[in-house]
Image: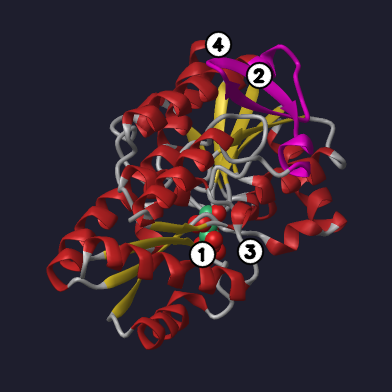
Amino acid sequence: MRKIALLTSGGDAPGMNACIRAIVLTSLRYGLEVYGYRHGFNGLLEQEYLNLRAKNVANIIQRGGTILNSARCLTFKSDDAAKVAAKNLDILGIEALLVIGGDGSFRGAKHLANHWSGQVIGLPGTIDNDVDGTDATIGYYTAIETALDSIDKVRDTADAFERIFLIEVMGRHAGFIGLNAAIASAADHIMLPEISRSCDDELENILAHIEAVKKRRGNTSYIVVVTENLWPDGVTSLAQILTEKTQIECRPVILGYVQRGGSPVSQDRVLATKLGAFAVEAALEGKTGVMVGEINQEIVCTELENSWLQKKPLDPYLVKIQQDLFDILKRP
Ligand code: F6P
């Protein structure tokens, strides 16, 4: 193999730059030319690429975002787009393409693999951690830290005013960030897609809990961590309902895109470096159609489609602990 390429796609995640760096340096170590396509799959369609050298990846390991830019490329779903991309990769003489992203990006990678004779390998990069075949995705640990830092700060003002706060975290349809940030911040309640009930049941449950906690502790702050896309009209409408029903001021806080930014924590940098280096070696061994991930400290390859076919479960023990603590809080 002489030429390898990479791109970052979908929601950016802290640690993507660390991964780019590892891929570039490992490729150079093996004497490969390495190309970075810009703006995700759009770069393949537009032939927008850079020849990457060691100097391009100096001083980036600590930076959030992605030096290659990212995008969601809806047009890439068509066969024609995949054929254009395949042709462009062949024109440049690329033999393997590494795709850093989440499940949407891996669907794109698989689609390309159906139309291109080169090798395609995925690396899990998303704050949501909703990719099977790896214990953690690149960016996930940093997102938890960012959410946690914000929840701790909200707790200060919640305590001062004895208010209820609903804090919406990202995760798309997965509760990994929510569960971990809630446990680490000692949140009073969580609402996660994996353990959600009907809206009526959720409301009844939370009102009963607030009432019980108030009886036990008197007026107090009360923090609820809610995964985005869970409550039909969003946390702002839920906050209004809770204010009316409890007669306690309830405020919504949508953490939003801050969770995608910032300097990656060490776990994300190390994971990104490990997977980046391994992906290049896997490409040199001829692997294709797989995602590289880490399970129990071992690097594993998973067929690309298996990264999204099954919903990755939350740690059941963490869910149990959270629910036990939640019950204890309301005991008299
Ligand atoms: O997948 C990462 C993520 O940040 C999700 O948590 C969120 O739902 C989504 O991306 C937001 O996507 P966009 O950047 O397209 O608004």
Q: In the image, residue 242 lies at what x, y percent?
A: 40, 80
First in sequence, mark 2 or 4: give its number. Answer: 4
Q: Residue furthest bottom?
A: 244
The residue under the point 56% across, 29% down is 135
Picture quadrant where residue 197 is located: bottom right
Three-letter code for the amino acid on which mark 1 is drawn: Glu
Q: Quadrant of residue 217?
A: bottom left
Q: Earlier in the sequence, mark 4 or mark 1?
A: 4
Q: Nearer the viewer, mark 1 or mark 3?
A: 3
Give the residue number, with chain letter if any, for mark 2: 300
Q: Which amino acid type corresponds to the residue marked 2 in the rendered image?
A: Val
Task: Using the image, tell me which numbered label, if any, was put on residue 157.
Answer: none
Callout in the foreground (2, 4) = 2
Instruction: Name the secondary structure under disc 3.
Output: loop
Which is in the foreground here, disc 1 or disc 2? 1
First in sequence: mark 3 vs mark 4: 4
Q: Position of residue 77 (x, y in %)?
A: 79, 58
Element under disc 2:
strand
Q: Residues within 10 Å of mark 4 (few under 14, many from 20)?
A: few
